[in-house]
Amino acid sequence: MNNKLKNILCIMMIIVLGYLQIGCESVDDNSSNLSNSNVSINKSDDSQIHFIDTGNSDAILIIKDGKAALIDGGDNDDEKRVVNYLKDQGVKELEYVFATHPHADHIGGLDAVVDAIKVNHLYVSNGDADTKSYRDFIESAADKGLSPSVPLLNSEFKLGDSKFKVLSVANTDDPNNNSIVLSYTNGNDKILLMGDAEADIEKNLNPGDVDLIKIGHHGSHSSSTREFIEKTNPEYAVILVGEDNKYGHPHKETMDLLKEKSIEVHRSDECKDIIVISTGNGLKVDCKKGSYNSGKNSKYNKNTTYNKEKVITQETNVSPSVSEEKIESENKKIKDIVNADKVYWSAKGKKYHSDPTCSGMKNPIAGTIEESKRTACSICY
């Protein structure tokens, strides 16, 4: 009887020890998870959208289910900032990198990103640019064995159980309008990422209602038309813009429209990094509401037009006592001022530029604004 009792006790002790071992292993696993919880790669149902403050340039990191994607990489001066930001978020691998278009303020830092972090898929827009920034980016990709490709219109890319959809991959003479335009959907939340796409692209897009829009082209009046804002009906707008930038971004027309529509604005010039949490059933923004103020250094008003036949605007009230000679004299002065500025354009381009290297122009033609017979580049002006 004593032997049987001893055997039973031994068996019970073995069972208890087994449970204790399992319990210890379970605690160890939980401890590991807790110790990794400081790493920002998110493994919950939430999705993180990081609008990284790189001044008047774009860099957007999205993290979902332990996977990450990057849309643009800031300007050349931002490369260390972008790489360090990704590493601080625990990003060791990027499932996708989308270079929306080849302007330096969108791809300037991507060569450093490609050098420092593993990239699985690299997508670029139609067109290229004969610039050092773009060459550096493409060479870094080649060194890593990456083959950049243009995504197909309406193609979808999964990031965990969220997804991107390509809404535009135009092929025009304007790199801004060639921007890869993406929608990002997590559950019931939809975010629209416009790159630098302008009004000509917006009129062909029909993404439906969105929760948040990354305003196109840093808040330039060349983007975000009334029609587009009304048909997308966003609750939030994010503007990536540098403080006191030379372009006057964001422009007054854009900010007045957002204010009129009561769209909550968040701006990198006021809030720095902007982090949005998508729960799948609503968005949370980590920074305070931004202002509806326009940029301070706007060079030209959108509504100012220089017409060869009539330079004084139609809204000018001319006193009957002012002679026709006086009006003609004033018109001539204005035309002389306008035509004194040398501008540049390409034979096939539709814009004139103040910078002959803008948009990677090849064999730029120099002349006056009037001679160009083109409209102003929204980057230069």
Image (cartoon, rainbow, N blue to C red):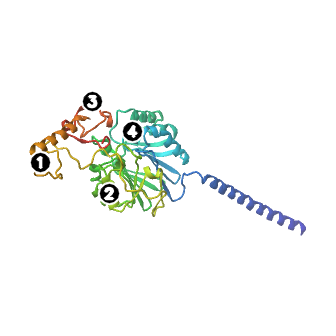
Q: CA distance from mark 4 to mark 1?
A: 50 Å
Crowd around label 4: few <14 · some 14–19 · many ≥20 (10 Å): many
Say which label, 3 or 1, has the lower sequence index: 1
Of labels 2 and 3, the one closer to you = 2
* Kind of residue at disc 4: Ala
**Rendered residue at 39%/46% (across/down):** 244
Residue tagged by mark 3? 363
Residue 134 seen in this snapshot: yes
Amino acid type assigned to the residue bearing label 1 in the image: Val
Q: Quadrant of the N terminus?
A: bottom right
For badge 3, the amino acid type reads Asn
Q: CA distance from mark 2 to mark 3?
A: 39 Å
Where in the figure is residue 20, as x and y percent of width and height?
A: 75, 60
Image spot of residue 309 (x, y percent): 13, 43
Residue 369 higher or lower than 5, as above or below: above
Q: What residue is pinned by disc 2?
A: 256
Task: Name the spot of residue 334 as percent of width and height, x first.
Answer: 19, 41
For discs 4 and 2, the disc positioned in front in the rendered view? 2
